[in-house]
Image (spheres, rainbow, N blue to C red):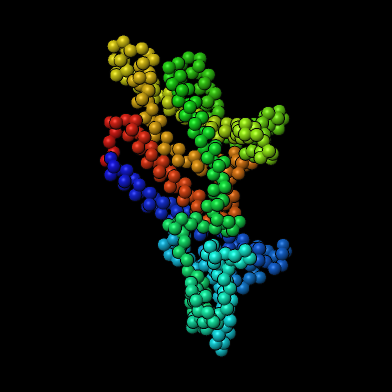
């Protein structure tokens, strides 16, 4: 069994590469990206210029510098290796153009210093250097040129200057947002408390309500309790979460004023007492949680009910009753454990609580969570954030599947993985 789980862990690597390769390829062929957005911002004429002419005010060198900045200066596979951290990234890239007969050019290089060398007024090292068409570069202090690389491009009459840096997923760098110029991990981390709260709340409420309800429905099969509860949970299952959210906001929040209509907390949250803060979070969370959970209740409840009914009809349960076991003992002592095995396969989903979110529900309730972040990053063509969220989601999903297998093996000792 140990070998099985080791193989499953190792499979995370090719699965992650395959998933990220596909999405990375899509980001390359999708029209309208960060490069086009930067070109639009660089337009000189303003609104009267057409989108077709966007970037017309930029020189070819400026466009190539933008392409290098956003990682669009390399072919697909090379760019993917750079994003992965398996190939160097050409940072702070610039071009020095030489006119015919020109033998050298003066350049000013601006390099970001290590954080421990930052001063109050400066975080950069400014260097003056002389560049020749063959790519050689000289300075009064040659040590200042450490880390800078030149590449002669005689066919274009210029020299490229850049700093090669290996930084990608393998080094723990999720990239920089092309929309906000902030680290992708920082943007994700800001939403962790919101996502973790809703994820844990949904996980605990779903299992603590659906398992007892499923047991009750199995024991009270075809009674009034079973029929009424089935009508309620299937009605909820049939209503999309965002539709229910709109109704709850209009009637319970806007008209009746029973609940807040938007946000994770109130504007005066910092001024509240500790019990007041707890109530404020819970008060804001009631309506979104109803919308998040309305669909999962039916599936989990009926899964529990049907599995328990199947086990109650088996020979070993009838034998236990024939030997004098009470109905309570037959249900809780014999049939329940086997009925929980299929439920255990879903427990691995606890790894996804960090990235729980629904785009439309978060939009309706103005919750700054991962669903909204994913939607906005795709809408803004913010590919580093899209790839960062995808990478973490794939890893969590794979770890969750492995955890599900482990929980199934614990719940049923008869299972042997090979």
Closer to the camera, 64 or 181? 181
The residue shown at (62%, 34%) is: 274
Which image quarter: residue 338?
A: top left
The residue shown at (50%, 52%) is: 388
Q: Is residue 293 visible?
A: yes
Counting every numbered tag in the picture gives 0
Residue 339 relative to residue 226: left or right = left
Residue 279 percent across, percent down from the top left: 62, 31
Closer to the camera, 16 or 191? 191
Relative to 9, residue 309 above or below: above
Which image quarter: residue 288?
A: top right
Q: Is residue 154 visible?
A: no
Closer to the camera, 404 or 149? 149
Q: Quadrant of the C terminus?
A: top left
Residue 87 percent across, percent down from the top left: 43, 65
The residue shown at (63%, 65%) is: 121
Relative to 313, residue 157 above or below: below
Closer to the camera, 178 or 246? 178
The residue shown at (36%, 16%) is: 329
Q: Quadrant of the N terminus?
A: top left
């Amino acid at each position: 069994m140990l070998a099985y789980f080791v193989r499953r862990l190792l499979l995370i690597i090719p699965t992650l590469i395959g998933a990220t390769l596909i999405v990375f390829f899509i980001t390359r062929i999708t029209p309208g990206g960060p490069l086009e957005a930067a070109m639009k911002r660089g337009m000189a004429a303003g609104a009267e210029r057409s989108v077709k002419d966007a970037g017309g005010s930029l020189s070819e060198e400026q466009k190539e510098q933008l392409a290098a900045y956003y990682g669009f200066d390399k072919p697909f596979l090379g760019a993917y290796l750079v994003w992965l951290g398996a190939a160097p990234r050409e940072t702070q890239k610039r071009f020095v153009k030489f006119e015919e007969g020109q033998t050298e050019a003066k350049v000013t290089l601006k390099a970001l210093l290590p954080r421990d060398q930052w001063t109050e007024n400066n975080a950069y090292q400014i260097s003056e250097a002389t560049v020749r068409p063959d790519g050689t570069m000289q300075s009064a202090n040659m040590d200042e040129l450490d880390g800078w690389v030149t590449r002669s491009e005689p066919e274009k009459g210029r020299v490229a200057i850049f700093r090669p840096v290996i930084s990608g997923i393998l080094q723990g760098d999720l990239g920089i947002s092309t929309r906000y110029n902030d680290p992708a991990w920082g943007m994700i981390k800001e939403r962790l408390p919101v996502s973790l709260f809703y994820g844990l709340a949904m996980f605990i409420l779903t299992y603590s309500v659906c398992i007892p309800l499923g047991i009750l429905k199995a024991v009270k099969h075809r009674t009034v309790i079973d029929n009424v509860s089935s009508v309620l949970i299937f009605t909820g299952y049939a209503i999309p979460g965002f539709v229910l959210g709109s109704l709850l906001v209009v009637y319970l929040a806007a008209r009746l004023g029973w609940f807040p209509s938007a946000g994770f907390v109130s504007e005066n949250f910092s001024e509240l007492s500790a019990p007041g803060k707890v109530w404020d979070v819970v008060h804001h969370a009631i309506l979104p949680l109803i919308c998040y959970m309305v669909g999962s209740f039916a599936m989990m409840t009926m899964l529990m009910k049907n599995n328990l009914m199947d086990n109650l009809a088996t020979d070993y349960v009838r034998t236990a009753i024939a030997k004098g076991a009470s109905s309570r003992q037959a249900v809780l002592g014999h049939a329940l454990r086997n009925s929980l095995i299929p439920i255990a396969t879903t427990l691995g989903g606890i790894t996804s609580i960090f990235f729980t979110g629904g785009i439309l529900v978060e939009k309706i309730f103005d919750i700054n969570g991962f669903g909204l972040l994913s939607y906005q990053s795709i809408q803004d063509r913010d590919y580093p954030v899209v790839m960062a969220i995808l990478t973490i989601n794939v890893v969590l999903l794979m770890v969750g599947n492995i955890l599900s297998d482990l929980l199934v093996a614990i719940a049923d000792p008869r299972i042997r993985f090979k």
